[in-house]
Image: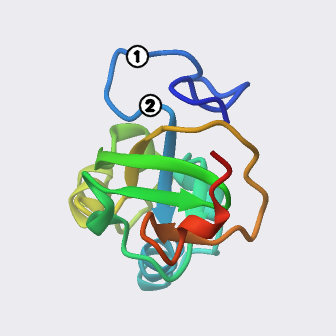
């Protein structure tokens, strides 16, 4: 992760035409719920988000600083579902528009990287507060 630029190799690396393009996150709980309701096999990669989280409400991080491991971010805006996501999750019983409607305000978070560093699988996501600051290398 490179501060202000994003993830090397990501399609949005270095782009600044939309807010929060450095990284996108999605809650595994939301995707699991959607897939279970629609009898779909669990596959979080179908969302196209960079990071899948567990145990933290991403909507609460809009406008807030948070950490993933030792990398600090600022939540910019909700990552609302796009037609690509709707198409990826549509089925015979569920149209693209229905998918988009169901995942509105539940499809994740866009964030900007404030510091550089590596993020490994299993890293803790937490609000940037005193309890979390012991991870910061400034």
* Quadrant position of the C terminus in the picture: top right
List x then y, in percent, for residue 20. Answer: 38, 35
Q: Nearer the viewer, residue 92 or 75?
A: 75
Q: Position of residue 29 (x, y in %)?
A: 48, 80
On the image, numbered disc 1 is attached to which residue? 16
| 94, 112: nearer the viewer | 112
Can you tell which quarter of the image residue 57 is in? Answer: bottom left
Looking at the rendering, in which quadrant would you find the N terminus?
top right
Q: Is residue 40 shown left or right of residue 56? A: right
Tell me if label 2 and label 1 are in contact, CB under 8 Å: yes
Q: Is residue 111 above or below residue 70?
A: above
Mark 2: which secondary structure? loop
Q: Which residue is mark 2?
A: 21
Q: Is residue 68 left or right of residue 109?
A: right
Q: Point out the tag, 2 or 1, that comes first from the N-terminus.
A: 1
Residue occupying image coordinates x 50% and y 83%: 55
Q: Is residue 39 above or below residue 22?
A: below
Quick one: label 1, few (<14), some, or many (20+) residues within 10 Å?
few
Q: What is the spatial separation of the Cα atoms under label 2 and label 1, in whole angstroms? A: 7 Å
Secondary structure at badge 1 equals: loop
Which residue shows up at 49% across the image and 75% down it?
A: 35
């Amino acid at each position: 992760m490179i501060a202000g630029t994003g993830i090397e190799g990501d399609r949005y690396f270095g782009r600044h035409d939309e807010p929060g393009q450095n990284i996108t996150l999605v809650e595994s709980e939301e995707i699991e719920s959607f897939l279970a309701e629609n009898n779909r096999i669990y596959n979080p990669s179908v969302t196209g988000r960079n990071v899948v989280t567990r145990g933290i409400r991403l909507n609460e991080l809009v406008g807030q600083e948070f950490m993933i491991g030792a990398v600090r971010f600022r939540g910019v805006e909700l990552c609302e579902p796009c037609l690509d996501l709707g198409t990826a999750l549509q089925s015979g019983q569920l149209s693209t528009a229905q998918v988009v409607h169901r995942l509105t305000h539940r499809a994740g978070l866009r964030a900007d990287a404030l510091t550089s560093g590596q993020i490994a699988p299993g890293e803790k996501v937490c609000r940037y507060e005193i309890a979390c600051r012991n991870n910061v290398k400034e």
